[in-house]
Amino acid sequence: MSDIKYILGSFGDPDEMMHGIEKLQENGVSIYDVYTPMPIHGIEAKLGIKRSRIDIAAFCFGITGTCAAFALIYFCAVIDWKVNIGGKPSFALPDFIPIMFELTVLFCAFGMVLTYYASTHLFPGRAPRVMDLRATDDRFVIAVDAKDNAAHTVIDGLLKDAGALEVKYNERKYISYE
Amino acid sequence: MSGHNESILREPLITGDNITYAKITDDILGPVENKPNKAWWIGFIVSALGALLWVVAVSYTFWNGIGAWGLNKTVGWAWDITGFVWWVGIGHAGTLISAVLLLFRQNWRNSINRSAEAMTIFAVICAATYVVSHMGRPWLAYWVLPLPNQFGSLWVNFNSPLVWDMFAISTYFSVSLLFWYTGLLPDIATIRDRAVGTRRKIYSIFSFGWSGSVKTWQRFEAVSLILAGISTPLVLSVHTIVSMDFATSVIPGWHTTIFPPYFVAGAIFSGFAMVLTLLLVARKVLGLENYITMFHIESMNKIIILTGSIVGVAYLTEFFIAWYSGSEYEQYAFINRSTGPYWWSYWMMMTCNVISPQLLWFKKIRLSIKATWILSIVVNVGMWFERFVIIVTSLHRDYIPSSWAMFYPTWVDVSVFVGSIGLFFTLFLLFLRVLPSIAIAEVKLLLKSASEQAKMKQIKDGHENKEYVAEYVESLQKFDSVKQEDYAKI
């Protein structure tokens, strides 16, 4: 058994890469992940990745913000310390709306983005898990787990047929680790 | 994306031949990965001196109190709030470009959104410093927050637009920062993977370990879209609330319901003007003519005509309503604006904001870089005067003629304002050096569909309607970055 952990097909064109994914799948090769310098539309469907549910999280955070703002203002202005402003009612809902709106947006934005960072494991100082340094520049990289897919030469051939400019054999999973 | 061709009738968003994904990265990262040129250093030194002036003037204000400004008992709010509203307004274009144009699928935003958003953040920083420095006792700035009584105050007054404004501006700043930074992650990763040594380590920390895997991108796109969706009403709410600082008062000239839409249009107007002021220079100095094309410049000019006209209609409506209301105080406020001691500022505003943008109806002016650049500055001068007119001329003749007064700025007023411009440019120039000024990943999305070379290929394939091709080639004449001779033989 060799030390090869991952086989990388490095493409110069997103359409060729999509073609490569099809080719591999037709031949029963499982794809570990795909690394691209830009979002590729339609790739999720091909790889069978489920729809992101981050919108649900965003809604929940947003509604929390609305409620939090209402609760804060209601407590301060209606329950805790009523201020008599020309005898007007202290529970003045229209005046609450601007802050309720702002806090909805604030909670939604921060809640959603922090959820995104947490679920995708993004945080300051995290060691980048990069298999090919050009995947953030001009290469579209398909990574295949070498241990799960035995026939390396077949994979190599399929990738090259699809238009891969280069096929790499990584002995370490992430080359970015020192 | 790829896979289908874009209509030949649309102008290209990326020009130049032999543009590849690698070339896009190289072109955009040029200023980040190389030593700055002389133009950058000159700009930076001048701006940094301005920023230094700002530090001196603001420190002087903190030490001596706002008595250092030219305020008096009649005009208790002048250059500080003028500067604040001016800067917040300028900030609006960034969010408009990044959020509203994203929702409308205007792909031309892709190459200008990054620097416009950066501009938003720096403009809001300048605005926020005015808020803090005009408080008189800035060390008690936290009193605007709803804190419990033992801090020495009641709860803040939630019926006051000034409190709403605190929430609006802080939400706007932090959400814009979040939107901008999340969008920057893939581009910081690009710099990281090309860099070596310490530089790589630094960019590695700031890239948050971005990998560009399928799931990362999928969530990234969902997050961007939702952020755009919530930022769109946010950007409209911010200047609406800023206008309510005035509109909910009972000062003649301020107490009008037209203020929110009029302020929002004015904000977008001045914001786009500032984007043009910055990008026309940046495009030339950084050599980004292929990405920020004449089409982008023309599109922005069109938005300036639209919003400038809305502002013009608002000025006239205000004047009409003042007369039509039958309220003599309201009428006097407006007569005083246009013919009183500050008549020159009123007519300065009218000329710069209403008349000069109408010149952009002429194609020749709209497509001239020099004319556009000068007009963009004229617009921002006009927008500064608009706020000055609204604020100072409404205040300086109040209820008792014996207390009527004039406002004269002191050197501190002037220095805080000039200094804030210095601060803004210092931050912007530093941004150009350390971060990509164009969203690399988003521009790469356009390469296979909306670039000149993709369209050239479409034409050469010969399946396109001849009339369409002729129209397309004609539309290319305005581009300064297109080689016209390439099309001569087609």
Image: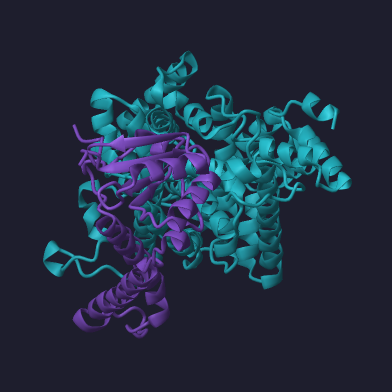
Count all numbered tags in the image, as a single digit: 0
Question: Looking at the image, which residue is at 57% across and 29% down?
Answer: B288
- The image quarter containing residue B378 is top right
Determine whether, in the image, residue A15 is placed left or right of residue B346.
left
For residue B51, above or below residue A75 = above
Q: Report the residue that reaches farthest toward the top.
A: B38
Q: Position of residue B220 (x, y in %)?
A: 40, 55
For residue B13, above or below residue B327 = above
Q: Is residue B240 visible?
A: no
Q: Nearer the viewer, residue B192 or A142?
A: A142
Q: Nearer the viewer, residue A78 or B136?
A: A78
Q: Is residue A7 visible?
A: yes
> Dividing the image into 4 quarters, which one contains the N terminus of chain A?
top left
Q: Nearer the viewer, residue B351 or B43?
A: B43
Determine whether, in the image, residue A78 is placed left or right of residue A139.
left
For residue B144, above or below residue B345 = below
Q: Position of residue B283 (x, y in %)?
A: 57, 29
Q: Position of residue B163 (x, y in %)?
A: 34, 64
Q: What colour has chain A?
A: purple
Q: Nearer the viewer, residue B124 or B467?
A: B467
Question: Looking at the image, which residue is at 51% across and 44% down?
Answer: A162
Q: Report the residue that reaches farthest toward the right.
A: B467
Q: Position of residue B94 (x, y in %)?
A: 50, 47
Q: What colour has chain B?
A: cyan
> Dividing the image into 4 quarters, which one contains the C terminus of chain A?
top left
